[in-house]
Image (cartoon, helix red, strand yellow):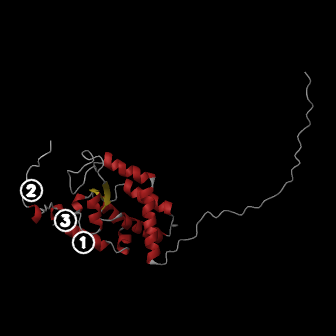
Amino acid sequence: MRIPIIEPYKETAPEENMFIPALELERPPLMLTTDKAKDKYIKYLEKCVRGSYEYKEYIEFLRTVGGMSFCSAFQNLSKSLIKKLALEIHHEPFTLYDIVNIMLRRFNNKGWNVDEYAISDAILDLHFRGMVGLIPLSYTVHELVHVGKVFIPLQHVDDGYMSFYQEFKQEISECELEDVLIKKIELSKTFNFKSNTILHKKFIYVTNEEYSNIPEKFKVAA
């Protein structure tokens, strides 16, 4: 067998040096100069939390293992009876919007870099530590709560929110939410779900003058 003669490889491509500037690891500070801009950013952070994998897994855990598989207003409505029941977890007495607002204020007070990932992680950590008040509600009741038609007595909510209050008392006061909490505590002393008259059953009977004598049975043609 003839062995081929192979010449040593020589690099003939031209060489070129490229300058890469240093990476900026820190973001410029976030400037929320108007209430509208702040509101928009809080809602964005709220969306980041709700959309995270960890939050979705946490809510699923509450529904399947944590005993939050029924509506607290209508306890006969449960996932075990109605598989497609639209059951949602409501934050009370501080909504998720309130919690994000309070955490944003904490970051500003501490001089920490306002970063959506860091804030989202901090809020998720509060949930994992049981420091937020949560209650399961059906979709309709949840909507009524948010428009102010239904009040949730705080004795029906896990008391983790009190630990949250103790740790973030300054920020809660700065966000003007302390008076709201006090008002809800006072209302809860004399209020219960039965006082929410909007949730009471109501039967409506319709009378049509043209059909005052409707037969009990209709004849079926053979």
Residue type at mark 1?
Lys
Q: CA distance from mark 2 to mark 3?
A: 33 Å
| For residue 22, side relative to residue 44 (left or right) | right
Please give the name of the residue rendered at 24% of the width and 63% of the height, measured from the top-left corner: 152
Tag shown at residue 53: none
Question: Foreground: 41 or 155?
Answer: 41
Is residue 207 visible in the rendered image? The answer is no
User: Nearer the N terminus, badge 2 or badge 3?
Assistant: 3
Please determine whether, in this image, residue 63 is positioned above or below residue 134: above
Residue type at mark 3?
Ile
Tag shown at residue 214: 2
Which residue in the structure is indicated by mark 3? Answer: 198
Q: Residues within 10 Å of mark 1 (few under 14, many from 20)?
A: few
Which residue in the structure is indicated by mark 1? Answer: 183
- Disc 1 versus disc 3: nearer the observer: 3
User: Nearer the N terminus, badge 1 or badge 3?
Assistant: 1
Q: Secondary structure at mark 2?
A: loop
Question: Foreground: 201 or 203?
Answer: 203
Circle 2/circle 3 CB separation < 8 Å: no
Residue 52, how many percent across, how many down? 45, 55
Please determine whether, in this image, residue 34 is positioned above or below residue 147: below
Q: Residues within 10 Å of mark 3 (few under 14, many from 20)?
A: few
- Disc 2 versus disc 3: nearer the observer: 2
Quadrant of residue 35 within the rendered picture: bottom left
Residue type at mark 2?
Ile
Please determine whether, in this image, residue 111 is positioned above or below residue 205: below
Q: CA distance from mark 2 to mark 1?
A: 54 Å
